[in-house]
Image: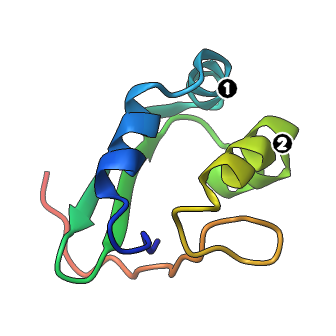
Amino acid sequence: MNLKPGFLEEYMRRHDAIWPELKTLLETSGIRDYSIFMDEETNILFGVQYLEGDNSSQDLGKNPLVQEWWGYMADIMETNPDNSPVSVNLEKVFHMD
């Protein structure tokens, strides 16, 4: 995902105050241990989350609450026409337990 330049503090502020109902939705969808990292040279955000069960976190984009969050974040992130964050799927090239 891509953060617009100069908005790191605002991005962090909004996530520090994540909506309780959104956090509950993520948890009940099986998302655990969710972290977002930032490369300050490129403004690229990299999210890592662990998912329990057979759900896909991509399915959450159909949820009206998630769509509302996207709208809330759209002014500080690069977004698609539906306000979803512009993102790139990454291929896992290494893993170690």
What residue lies at 60% left-to-right and 53% top-to-bottom? 73
What residue lies at 50% left-to-right and 79% top-to-bottom? 89
Which residue type does callout 1 highlight? Leu
Q: In the picture shown, does residue 3 fall above or below 12?
A: below
Q: Earlier in the sequence, mark 2 or mark 1?
A: 1
Q: Is residue 57 left or right of residue 38?
A: right
User: Is residue 48 or residue 56 the one in the foreground?
Assistant: 48
Query: Is label 2 in contact with label 1 (beta carbons under 8 Å)?
Result: yes
- Residue 78 visible somewhere in the drawing: yes
Point out residue 2 in the picture as x, y percentages from the top left corner.
Answer: 44, 74
Q: In the picture shown, does residue 68 fall above or below 25?
A: below
Q: CA distance from mark 2 to mark 1?
A: 9 Å
Q: Label 2 neighbourhood size at 10 Å, few (<14), some (14-19), many (20+)?
A: few
Q: Is residue 5 left or right of residue 76?
A: left
Point out residue 18 in the picture as x, y percentages from the top left corner.
Answer: 51, 28
Outermost residue, left side:
96
Q: Label 1 neighbourhood size at 10 Å, few (<14), some (14-19), many (20+)?
A: some
Q: Quadrant of residue 7?
A: bottom left
Q: Secondary structure at mark 2?
A: loop
Name the mark on residue 9. none
Q: Is residue 82 left or right of residue 41?
A: right
Q: In the picture shown, does residue 91 fall above or below 67?
A: below
Which residue type does callout 2 highlight? Asn
The residue singled out by tag 2 in the image is 63
Q: Secondary structure at mark 1?
A: helix
Q: Quadrant of residue 46?
A: bottom left
Outermost residue, front side:
6
Q: Is residue 82 left or right of residue 6?
A: right
User: Is residue 68 or residue 60 the one in the foreground?
Assistant: 68
| Count of marks placed on residues | 2
The residue singled out by tag 1 in the image is 25
Point out residue 76 in the picture as x, y percentages from the top left corner.
Answer: 52, 62
